[in-house]
Amino acid sequence: MNHRSWMAKHGLKLVALAFWLVLLGGYFGYAWRNALTPLEVVQATADFLRTPTGPLFFILLYALRPLIFFPASLLTIAGGSIFGPWAGILYVVVGSNASASVAYVVGRYFGQGVLPTDESATGIVQKYALRMRDNSFVTILVMRFIFLPYDLVNYLAGFLHIHYRAFILATLLGSIPGTISFVLFGASFDIRQGLQEAQLNGWSLAASVAIFVVSLALSRYFKAQEGVGK
């Protein structure tokens, strides 16, 4: 294996590793210099995100998330807790679509080595890959509804050079139920007054559970129609 192919396969992992080393180093350095507990560091981060520039930082972090392998669900829940339901949904929708676009670009221009190529590893994705070029919008919409790995779908769409407009519109529509459910779940634990004074919002939690149940039912319906898991 030559140097170029090795870098194409492992370069993204090296970038993610470097980022996490810097992030962890910055966290421990900040906590040590200011004599803060982990809970106090989380509170300081939440306070910063509620400043006028905080939402921009949150959206940027969400956009870069696919490059550092940070779970989207954690950021989505955090968005609801920090910003509340309405602003949280807005910022998460913007950030998640930005992250989908970043992964799409990575897959389109640096796709070699990003996706596994053996059939055993990507069988279900390969099933849809052949359809994505012919009917991009509907295929990607179905892939969102049945909860295929979010970033893998993004990378695959770029790798296959799917039309961007169809990709991002299907992503936006197909991700709305899950996004709202997770943001409302986060908003049900309101920390805007501080972690020590977090309060449970029963209405937000109930709405989150209801939408999540509907999302699962929708997923089961499309899986049955697609024959997934049979």
Image (cartoon, grey):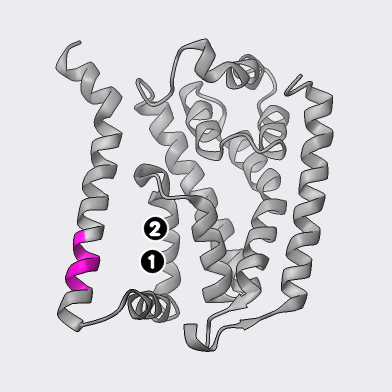
Residue at mark 2: 61
Viewed as shown, does residue 26 lie left or right of 214?
Answer: left
In which quarter of the view is residue 60 placed? bottom left
As helix, strand or loop, the secondary structure at mark 2 comes to helix
Residue at mark 1: 57
Q: Position of residue 137 (x, y in %)?
A: 68, 31
Q: Residue at x 69, y 27 (%)?
A: 139
Nearer to me, 213 or 80? 213
Residue extending furthest front? 37
Q: Residue at x 42, y 75 (%)?
A: 49
Nearer to me, 226 or 28? 28
Q: CA distance from mark 1 to mark 2?
A: 6 Å
Viewed as shown, does residue 120 lie left or right of 33?
Answer: right
Q: Position of residue 229 (x, y in %)?
A: 73, 23
In which quarter of the view is residue 126 placed? top right
Q: Please tell me whether residue 26 belongs to the stretch shown in magenta.
A: yes
Magenta region: 25-30
For the N terminus, the quadrant is: top left
Q: Position of residue 136 (x, y in %)?
A: 65, 26
As helix, strand or loop, the secondary structure at mark 1 comes to helix
Q: Main secondary structure of the magenta part?
A: helix
Q: Position of residue 177 (x, y in %)?
A: 72, 52
For the C terminus, the quadrant is: top right
Look at the image and tell me whether residue 194 can be seen: no
On screen, 118 above or below 59?
above
Viewed as shown, does residue 121 lie left or right of 38?
Answer: right
Q: Amino acid at mark 1?
A: Phe
Give the crowd class for mark 2: few <14, some 14-19, many >=20 residues within 10 Å: some
Viewed as shown, does residue 128 lie left or right of 42?
Answer: right
Kindly check if marks 1 and 2 are in contact, taking CB atoms under 8 A apart as contact: yes
